[in-house]
Amino acid sequence: MSPLKLIKNKTYINGEWVAAADGKTFAVYNPFDGTRLADVPDMGAKDTQTAIEAAAIAFEKWKKTTATERANILKKWHQLQLKYAEDLAILLTTEQGKPLKEAIGEVRYGASFVEWFAEEARRSYGDVIPTHSSDKRLIALKQPIGVVAAITPWNFPNAMITRKVAPALAAGCAVVIKPAEDTPLSALALAALAEEAGFPAGVFNVVTTRQPAVVGKELTANSLVRKLSFTGSTAVGKLLMRQCADTVKKVSLELGGNAPFIVFEDADIDKAVTGAIASKYRNAGQTCVCANRFYVQESIIEEFTKKLIKAIQQQKIGSGLAEGVQIGPLINEKAAQKVADLVADAQQKGAEVLLGGKPYELNDKGHFFEATVLTNLHTEMAIYQAEIFGPIAAIYSFSTEEEVIKLANDTNYGLAAYFYGRDYARIWRVAEALEYGMVGINTGMISTAVAPFGGIKESGIGREGSKYGIEEYLEVKYLCFGGL
């Protein structure tokens, strides 16, 4: 199968490839050069309702299948994703822009959730509860919550779907997926493989649209949907949560981040630089868990900064399909402008640009920005609280452990944090003091299917991956047997 065969110009609802009810479509473009890749259905509220109703009907049968039956289909889906990993990755790079090596990594990472939850399907155990009365027996069992709506972002158009959908399907739920309008093709390719894997009609549905507010309103207002899982901005997450309140849906929200990356003076600086590159410049800085604020202890800040700049200068910018490229284009013009505005604001308020600092002129269609390093920063700059989502390393200095913990926690976000050091007493103190759902210690890469992914504060609710991930799609039912 070639990447071109995975490109679909219709979407997948109730086991069929369909157009929008009104026939409308929208174009999907390559962010590198503006090439038009495909036209996909521009669906609205009516189409979304059709998908939800199909999922509700399918759920009634799917929830009655055994965990083994669900696991076997999930395993087939996993095997197909690995079989066509390179084709999926080429498609992903073409519509999203990230380097092909990263795209292949994303596809395999995404597939790992399918494998993990295929196995977890058999482990959704309940409990026998010691009774409070000799004539009663108490049981707690777990049941699938129902129809699940999954709204996914453009920065990981493959893995963010599998991370949400695999546990839902494993639990016995049916799903309706709304992928980001910039990157719907990866979602449709996954649907094609899900169809080949053998999911029954209506269990797996995709609604493509460039009317996210309209579709989102239907997904949140429709009483047939019992669970919403969303990854995206905090502002949109808050809106969706409010909209879900009227039908009291269960929600999982993975929202914005403002990750600190702390380097203590006893750290291995070379390893810290390697971790910084991995964390900051992956996907051109367009990840929710990437390092946003670098806090480096005063005694080593000069050495760290010099080594970081040297490492950054080795990063090649260009097409994600080109050999040796580490930084691809930003997703669109709006994203590129946001990064430029943050740098301009910082400069106007006294920041020093040590490297980069301006758009990268590669062609007249792509949206590139130079890998950038800023210093002389302070809290009045927009970049201090913003989720940068671009290849910008903002470096701050600190003197004491107490000071840097206060600085690191000075944000409404609480998704991911990182720090480097070798004093194990301090490692424990800092790890416990950082107000974040995930902490990377002497590593810049923390994501894995086997660990719980998610944040605290305004970075979200719930966890994805690990044994905790399937719990988001299950209800606990208590049974009291009397008269014994």
Image (cartoon, rainbow, N blue to C red):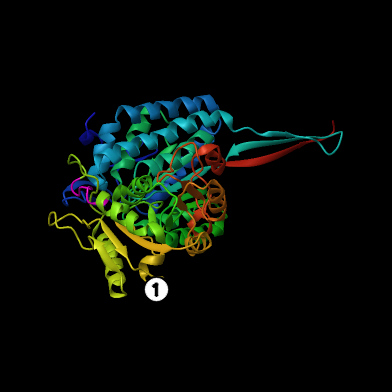
Q: Which residue is mark 1?
A: 380
Q: Is residue 407 left or right of residue 287?
A: right
- Nearer to us in this view, 291 or 99: 291
Q: Which residues are magenta?
A: 312-319
Residue 9 found in image quarter: top left
- Nearer to us in this view, 224 or 195: 195
Looking at the image, is 361 positioned above or below residue 1?
below
Query: What secondary structure characterizes most of the magenta part?
Result: loop
* Position in image of residue 312 (x %, y %): 26, 51
* Position in image of residue 97 (x %, y %): 24, 47
10 Å crowding of disc 1: few (<14), some (14-19), many (20+):
few
- Nearer to us in this view, 362 or 312: 312
- Nearer to us in this view, 431 or 207: 431
Q: Is residue 348 left or right of residue 49?
A: left
Tell me if residue 315 is in the magenta stretch. Answer: yes
Q: Is residue 356 left or right of residue 271?
A: left
Q: Quadrant of the N terminus?
A: top left
Specify the amino acid type for callout 1. Answer: Glu
- Looking at the image, which residue is at 39% across and 37% down? 110
Looking at the image, is 288 positioned above or below residue 60?
below
Q: Is residue 92 left or right of residue 195?
A: left
* Position in image of residue 440 (x %, y %): 46, 47
* Position in image of residue 39 (x %, y %): 22, 47
